[in-house]
Each structure stands twice: as C-alpha cells, then as structure tokens.
Amino acid sequence: MNISTSNLTLGYGDFIVLKDINVTIPKNKVTILVGSNGCGKSTLLKTMARLLKPMSGKVVLGDMDIFQKPSKEIAKELAILTQSPDAPSDLTVFNLVKQGRYPYQSWFNQWSKEDENIVDYALEKTGLSDIRDKKLSELSGGQKQRVWIAMTLAQQTEIILLDEPTNHLDIKYKIEVLDLLKHLNQQENRTIVVVLHDINLACRYADHIIAIKDGKVYAEGDPKEIVTEKLINDVFDINAKIIECPLFKTPMCITYQNLTI
Amino acid sequence: MKSLFVARKGRLSFLYEKRSTLVVAISMLICIFSILLSLSMGQKYISIFKVIQILFDGSIGGDSLIVNTIRLPRTLVALFVGASLGLSGAILQGVVKNPLAAPNIIGITDSGSVGALIFLTLFTDPKNNALTTSIFYMPVFAFAGAFAAVLIVYLLAYKKGVTPYRLIMIGIAVAGAAKAITSILIINGPVVFIKEAQLWITGTIYGTNWTHVKLLLPWFLVLFVLTLIYTRELNIQNLDDGISVGLGSSVEKNRFLLMILSAALASGAVAVGGGISFVGLIAPHISRKLTNSSFGNVLPLSAVVGGIIVVISDIAARTMLFPLDLPVGIFTAGIGAPFFVYLLLKSQRALRRGF
Ligand SMILES: Nc1ncnc2c1ncn2[C@@H]1O[C@H](COP(=O)(O)OP(=O)(O)OP(=O)(O)O)[C@@H](O)[C@H]1O
Ligand SMILES: [Mg+2]
C-alpha cells in the first residue's frame, strides 16, 4: 500500500501552514519528518491520516483519494498515533489497547480469537503484558506512551504514522520505541512515518528524512545524503558541526548557538 | 486471560470482564434489596417476607393494596428515574469526554423546568388557583422543554461538526438562560404555583402511580437497549477525536446519536421526577470507581447505581420526617455524595485527569 500527497495545501481557517506539498512515502521504509516547532509536521501527518481536510490537493492511499475511502477500511491499512493523546484515566491498559481492534469488530463479533491474539502480540511487543490490568492513571508517562503505541499496533496496519511517539520517554525507552519501530519495519515490512525532534536519532533510524521549512519541503532523502550543516542551519535555525556517528555510521550533529559558552 | 470471560460461537464473539460482571451482579442484588426495603417501609411497616409473598402470590388485603397500588409504582418510578439519569450521565460524560458533565449541566434539567412552568402558567386558573387541566400533562411539557434544550445546544454548538468543548460551554449558557426564564415565570406566577414549581425543581416523585410507570418503563427499556448497541461507539467517543477518527469511527454521527440517547433518557426522567440532581453526575463516577472506564461496565452499572440512589433517597424522603413527604431531590445528593467521597478516599490513587 502506497501513500503519497499531491499538491497538498493545508491550513486552518484561512491560515496556510503548508503549500503544494508533493511527497511519496517510500514503501516498507522508515520515514522521519523533521522541522522546527509549528512548521506543520503534525498538520501534514494528520492530513495523511484523513483527520484533517486539505484546503486543496489530495492524499492518495493505494490508488484512491483517502477522503473517498470508507474510514473503517482506511483504519485497517493505516494507523495513526496523534501527538500526546488524552485518555480517561480509569481505563485499563487492556481496555485501551483492545480499541485498536475496533475497525475489525462489529456488535456481533466483539472479541474474535484473532483480536485476542493480536492484542496479546501488541502488549507483548511493547512490554506491557505484565501490567495489562493496571489503570492508565497508575502508569508513568513512558508506560502510557507505550500503551498508545500498542493500540496502534493492534490495528495491524501496513502503514503506521506516529507523531512524536518518544515524547515523555527517558533515553532508554526512546531507543526502545525506535528499535521497536525499526523492528516492525524490518521484520514485518511495515511502512513507518514518524515525527521526531531529535535530529541525531532521526538520522540513525530513518531510511528517508523529510525536512519541512517555511510551509514547504526543504529537502527529502537518505539522511546520509541530505543532512548537512546548511540544512540544520536553515531548518532549525541553529549552527551545527556534522560528524559520522562512530557506531551507526550515520550523520551526527553537534549543535550550538555560539562557540563560546 | 484469567480476568476475562470470552463467549465465542461461529462468527459471534463477546468479551466480559469477570470482576466487573460480578460487580454488576452484586449491585443488582443490592438494587433488588433496596426495592424490597422501599416496599416494606412507610406509614405502615410491612415485613420484607410479607412483601415478597404479596408480590408473588398476589394475595389481596390491606397490605397488598398498599404495596401494589401505592408503594410499588412509586418505587418503580424511583428506580427508572434513577436508572435513566445514571445512564444519561454516563453517556454524556463519554460523549463530551468530561467526567464532570451531567444532564443538568447542559441545560436538560433547567429547560425541563421551563417546560413544566409553562404548563403551570398556561393551565393555572388565577381566580381559584386550580389547574384547568390534568396534572398528567405536565410531564409532556417538561419533556418537550428538556429535549428542545438539547437540540438547541447541539445546533448552536454546530460549526462543521460539534466539539465537546463547545457543547459544554453552550450547554451552560442554555442552562443559565433557562434558569432566568424559570425565575421570571415563578415571580410572575400565581402564589400556589411557587410551591408546586419549587417542588418540581427540587425533584419529587410524590404521588406517582402506575400511569407514570407505564410511560417511563418502555421509554427507558428501549433507550437502554439502544445504548447497549452503541456501547462500542461510546468507548471510542471517549478517546481523543483524532484517535477515534483514526480507528475508523464516524465520530460526528455517533456523537449526535449518543447525545440524543442521553437527552431522551434524561428528558424522560425529568418529565416524571422533576429536577432530581446529582444522580446523573455521581452514578457514572461510582461505576467507574467500582470497575473501570470501559463503557461495557459503566453503562449497566450506572443504570443500576442510579436506580439504587433514587430508591434509597425516596425511602429517606418518605420516612425521615414522617408524616412529611419531602422531595426526593433533597436526598439524592445527601446519599450519593458521601458514598462517592468514601470511594474516592478508598482508592488512594493520584487524582489525575478527571479523577
Ligand atoms: N487546530 C488549529 N487551529 C489553528 N491553527 C493551528 C491548529 N493546529 C495547529 N495550528 C497552527 O498550524 C501551524 C502548524 O502546526 P503543527 O501542529 O502542524 O506544527 P508541528 O510542526 O507539529 O509543531 P510541533 O513540533 O510543536 O508539534 C502552527 O503555526 C500552529 O499554530
Ligand atoms: Mg506537532
């Protein structure tokens, strides 16, 4: 299943955020969206997941305009985790993760064997099996974040869009979540699109980076090819020195404002 | 999987949480007990065993007359008014994603009052302070007022769909306007009217009979079944809109349908019982504390807990200051609130979003 945008113009009211965006998300790859606060990463991601109607242009999923497709069918092909979603605190982990099965269920078929297996798998993958009956109010920020990821996994979609899934996570869980996404991509051939603020982790995990700046795609491609000092300077408005990461051989940015502190 | 009970046959499959199902069963037993208690207490004490005998044997005589024609209809009205309010509150809290929402917050109760007062204004003969028509038409007016309020709130909140936030804000405004109209009607109304109106606004089921039961019961049952059919959608509504749409739910359509269900339930209760407060707020809370936020548990439990609260409140209203028969609305808060506080204190968890 391919997803791409054609001449997308996005905004709120008459405030235009992104103009004429044409991107094709590479199939079965990890794509990471980067850009400064408020540049429109979430806006783009939401539109690709039919949560936001474009001002003009369209999102094409498979061979169809996403807004022409039945929403439940889309939910079986594409899952989205929005930026810091809220959920009722008296919900248990299991209660929430099981909602990922919603598009597959009906009133008569509320809990098939398949639902059960997939929810177990999602809990297992995110390391939540032991706390499945805990209420969300009893979890740490990082655990909660993993519950949301588990819910999107339970949707069993080929495409997964995640908006800052590593928010609230300490460095260990950050790496764990990104490793998990990479694993889903490599072992299960899923197409993953992530919004991420940490440019170094983006370079490490992305097969493809899309950098957004001033309502446009500033650059896109393999991080090794496109991430330069100029890109960091233009996109994030900060100076950078780029070296090669000794472990992963990906670009690593040392960012600074002034050379004297 | 130990905590779950799964029923599968062919392409049918259902899931129950064992503990929550047990909680619902126990609360139903408590509910039955409170009904029996309500039938046994009053001016004349009739033992619970006798009550059971009367109910099942249909034996005739003085006691059976008291139970069958006076106490039973009143108790059933209490039960279904409470159940309707509890259920309505649970649905509303899910739809607006806010555990502080209740039917009276979005103007249902106050607009019901306006309807009831319009009835009293139109049909009270100022010369002899008597009604010119049967009091039985009052619920019709109350219902119309309450239901109209929800439609108005929904229409005013509509701007390419409605957001929970706009629903609440406009609901509060409509409730405020309705309160103002109520005051105007009371101040300008005839004197007898003030007491009648005040009773109604506090909420009373004094003098309800089988006619009320026959009106309320089918209404409640139909809406209850519809609510159960929409339980899955309500679970989805309770999440962020972005997540709900992402899961493929028709968020706007379901929000509208669920609002109508909630309004219809509350309007029915308000029409018969007047402005009984607190039940719609507290019953869903208690239910969530006893189980979890999954509406498969919260919905049936809210109905049962709401029923229990009003039935017990009515016992108190009838017996505490006997021979005074106080409006039940005075006691619903008095009985619901302490129990709720107790539950809050017992569950010593961090009170984050929406306790
Ligand atoms: N619901 C909304 N209504 C009006 N304007 C909005 C809305 N959501 C976002 N915006 C505006 O659109 C622009 C892009 O917002 P967006 O959330 O897409 O940024 P972002 O790149 O995800 O930023 P961040 O890194 O902070 O999450 C911002 O200027 C923001 O103020
Ligand atoms: Mg964002």
Image: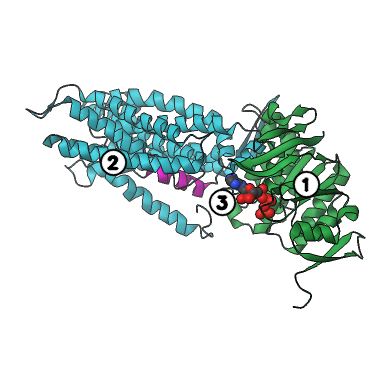
Chain colours: A green, B cyan
- Relative placement, left or right, of A26 versus B125 is right
Q: Quadrant of residue B213?
A: top left
Q: Where residue B265 is drawn, which disc sits there?
A: none
Residue A127: tell me if it is visible: yes
Q: Which secondary structure type mostly characterizes the magenta part of the structure?
A: helix
Residue at image coords 20%, 29%: B120
Write down the residue under mark 2. B179
**Secondary structure found at label 3:** loop
Q: Which mark is residue A89?
A: 3
| Same chain shared by disc 2 and disc 3 | no
Alpha carbons under labels 1 and 3: distance apart: 38 Å
Please state which amino acid type lies under the numbered disc 2.
Lys
Of all chains, the one bearing label 2 is B
Give the class, few, some or many, for how many residues have Cα within 10 Å of label 2's Cα (few <14, many ≥20).
some
Tag 3: residue type?
A: Ser
Q: Nearer the viewer, residue B246 or A195?
A: A195
Share a chain, discs 1 and 3?
yes
Lower sequence index among marks 1 and 3: 3
Please state which amino acid type lies under the numbered disc 1. Answer: Val
- Of helix, strand and loop, which one carries label 1? strand
Ligand 1 is within 8 Å of the C-beta of the residue at disc 2: no
Please give left or right for residue B133 compared with residue A53 in the image: left
The residue wearing badge 1 is A217
